[in-house]
Image (cartoon, coloured by chain):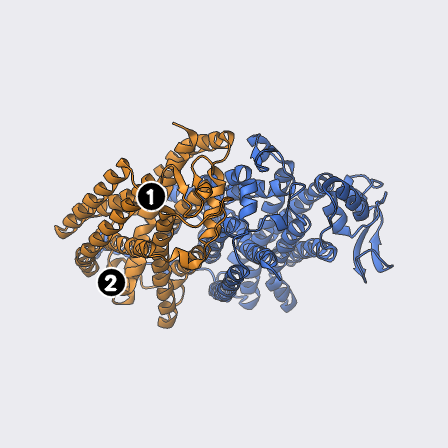
Amino acid sequence: MELTTIWFLLIAVLFTGYFILEGFDFGVGMLLPVLGRDDRERRVLINTIGPVWDGNEVWLITAGGAMFAAFPEWYATMFSGLYLPLLLILLALIARGVAFEYRHKRPEPSWKRRWDAAIFFGSLVPAVLWGVAFANILRGVPLDAQHEYVGGLLDLLNPYALLGGVTTAALFLTHGAVFIALKTVGEVRERAGKLAVRVGAVTALLAVAFLAWTLGIRSSTLAVALAAAAAVALIAGLAAARARREGWAFTGTAAAIGLAVATLFAALFPNVLPSTLDAAGTLTATNAASTPYTLKIMSWIAVVFTPIVLAYQGWTYWVFRKRIGVAHIPQH
Amino acid sequence: MDALDVARWQFGVTTVYHFLFVPLTIGLSVLVAILQTMWHRTGNERYLKLTKFYGKLFLINFAMGVVTGIVQEFQFGMNWSDYSRFVGDVFGAPLAIEALVAFFLESTFLGLWIFGWDRLPKRLHLASIWAAAIGSTLSAYFILAANSFMQNPVGYRINPDTGRAELTDFVALLTNKVALVTFPHTIASAFLVAGSLLVAVALWHLIRNRDSADTPTYRFAAKFGSWVTLIAAGAVVISGDIQGKIMTQVQPMKMAAAEGLYNTESPASFSVLTVGSLDGSREVFAIKIPYLLSYLGTGHLDGTVRGIDDLQAQYASQYGAGNYAPIIPVTYWSFRFMIAFGMAAAAIALLVLWTHRKGRTPSSKWLLRAGLVMPLLPLLASSFGWIFTEMGRQPWIVFGEMLTRNGVSRSVSLTEVLTSFTAFTLIYATLAVVEFKLLVRYAKGGVPDLTEQPENDDSHDDAERPLAFAY
């Protein structure tokens, strides 16, 4: 396999990992005001992701760095072209990250309310905008022959991209509810389980519509197969949630998100950022790539370190595997 | 004002702001790890108290470092896309490696450390803070290697077909002599900040509440912090001295700009301060130390230091017409402020050690005041250091290869970059106030009373016991 293909796959894997992992973080954040009826319950929710959210976010930083190193043109055009959505995502991630750490640092209800709002909006905004961003990448954006973005903000807010945004938000919400049901005890767990089933039905409709539209724009045999598998995984996950098999439900939503992201990348390949104007403006895994020398070095580093990272990050989830409930939340 | 100006201001503001949190993350992670190791070795509760106390301050600061760091990585693509296209093949690699090798280590193990007090065996918990500290330090190396490429590009060639920089020697990139010397300089300055914070907080408690049962604990922290500050100051000076000589070789214009030296001189003197103009056009009042610039730049008292006019003429013939000198007052004063603020912190550390001699405990209100400004001094010093080294590279974004003005994103409008600059400035300013107040609040709170920690309560079984730490 060509090095450029390997790096296209690796970046797909990094974004897939990011959306599976931070997907439930975003879901937990969006559900904070819904499932957490008092401060202790909200703390239960936040603490389900407390030890892991930061490590999950590093998947994004690594994906960004890998794009920069392996496909500088893709990184440069995408980040400057999707300027305002990415700016909003950054602001949201700033507010949200600080909120997790600072919320419990003062006892005043007004203090906590403000950080709760930061967690809610800081999770909602990226959950929607990542969908908008990736839908636009798949659909293509106006690029001139020098691969320079020549559209405006309104070009990014097309109906397909907006459906993408609603879909990712719904998927992450369901994924988060399932995760909470898996990681908590007591009333929070009950409520989360019920909510997952209810929201899940709408999510499944949105996801199927979005994936079908995606395959209508561009497609391949692999993409069709992945999209079908994503739909099956989501429905199986929801059935498991209904049967209160929480581990399987989480496996289902995680697989559904992973397969949906994989569908986008499979449909995109070999392009990385198609142009809706001049075909010469389209960025591909070949014309956006770094030199073979850089890709080779980066491959060796990825081969050595990725398994190590996966091992210790997996171990972290094992260490914090126990469910928590209001009884576990200390007074101060 | 155009998009380029705003993009430059945004990079300056977000980078200096980000670097207010980085030194404490690097320095304090190691110091907290050392304190916890001392507790582990001796079983003395004093060290556990200090671990938990400074650990809390460390985490308040760490959160800000993380979230402002994401901006840094995105900003290259958003505001500097032509730069990213030009250097991506070279510059992207250390950034990607930094994330994969360092950031995962740092964030994952810090999560384990924060929440793992009762979940992990003691040894593993101690190893977690060390792993996080190593991650932070490693990240500094990779990002400094990337920055050093901008100062002194090595291990690359320019592809004649694409006009882009391409990596040809990865080892050369990572062993850039600028990176090798900037790394110890930066790490030492991080300990200057962290040591100063230890001292400031401990002094406040010592002088405000002399009869506290925790006085011996704070005495230890003040002395420990002072020693760290002094040793770090020594390392800053030694590494800075080597750095000056390398800079004179690879970026002679930056050295000339540090002094505002217009004419090549041998020997060259160093001015402590200059009153009047720095544009070389008229006589000014200055306090000068003869031979010092020659020594700083070359290691010889009578070494030749090339002047701005000379270098300007050389670069104009080499790279074409244009102004190749940075803004002299900025480089001149930032260089002096960096040195002065750093040395002032070391001086206070010395004073603190003196007031602790032979079992004494300081009580002076003046020492308290000096102690409270102490952590701000090395923070200012590192900010000015970065302003100096980045502004001193101008007009280049990659020295000798690409001008800053050619690196900016062509597709990003003035409105967009203004929106982004305003938004970051507002959210950063707000968070600065919040963070500072929290730090002060928790610093005033003092070391925890460990007897109040909930004991293992037999009425609960293990599954019901509250978490040792929760958000």
From the image, tell me which residue sits under label 1: A16
For the residue marked with disc 2, what is the amino acid?
A: Leu
> Can residue A23 be seen here?
yes
Secondary structure of the residue carrying numbered label 1: helix
- Comes first in the chain, label 1 or label 2: 1
Relative to A37, A51 lies left or right: right
Q: Chain A is shown in which shade?
A: orange
Q: Name the residue under label 2.
A: A35
Give the camera-side residue of A104 and B154: B154
Identified by mark 1, the residue type is Thr
- Image location (x, y in percent) of residue B176: 62, 36
Chain displayed in blue: B
Q: Where is residue B372 in the image (x, y as percent from the top left)?
A: 59, 64
Please state the horizontal and vertical placement of residue A228, each as a whole percent of the image: 21, 42
Farthest front residue in view: A278
Taking B282 as reference, is B464 left or right? Answer: left
CA–CA distance between discs 1 and 2? 27 Å
The image quadrant that residue B360 belongs to is bottom right
Identity of the residue furthest to the right in this view: B283
The residue that appears at 39% across and 33% down in the rendered structure is A5
- Picture residue at 78% right of the left edge, 52% below the top: B260
Q: Which of B338 and B58 is in front in this view?
A: B338
Q: Which of marks 1 and 2 is in front?
A: 1
